[in-house]
Image (cartoon, grey):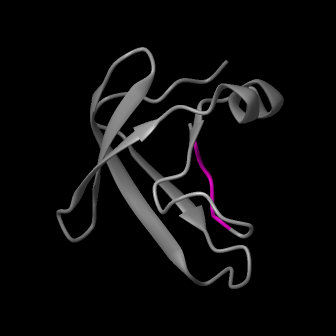
Amino acid sequence: MKRFEIGKKYSMTSVCDHECVWTYEVIARTACMITLKDEDGEVTKCRINKKISEFRNAESVHPLGRYSFAPTLSA
């Protein structure tokens, strides 16, 4: 399984608009959580979703919240 690495940047796109892109840098991590910093410098802590991570074979989180069209950030 792919894992998030400290210092690397990851991007995700909107489900509705492929030109809408969010980029996050992983600044810290534990076994269950990662800390992300967005392009504006805001820091967010996210719990790694085990069910989605197993399905995608890569760690996955929802930095913008969980809702029907929420984008997923994957390693």
33 vs 70: above or below: above
Q: How many marks?
A: 0
| In the foreground, 64 or 10 | 64
**Residue at the outermost front position:** 67
Picture coordinates of residue 69, whole percent (x, y): 72, 70
37 vs 21: above or below: above
| In the foreground, 11 or 28 | 28
| Direction from residue 39 to residue 18 in the image, left or right | right
| Direction from residue 39 to residue 5 in the image, left or right | right
Magenta stretch containing residue 73, yes or no? yes
Quadrant of the image containing the C terminus: top right
Quadrant of the image containing the N terminus: top right
Picture coordinates of residue 20, whole percent (x, y): 56, 81
What's the residue at 68%, 79% (across, down)? 18
| Direction from residue 61 to residue 27 in the image, left or right | left
What's the residue at 37%, 55% (across, down)? 24
**Residue at the outermost right position:** 55
Magenta residues span 70-74
Q: What is the magenta segment's predominant secondary structure?
A: loop
Q: Quadrant of residue 13?
A: bottom right
| In the foreground, 10 or 16 | 16
46 vs 59: above or below: below
Q: Quadrant of residue 14?
A: bottom right
| Direction from residue 74 to residue 52 in the image, left or right | right
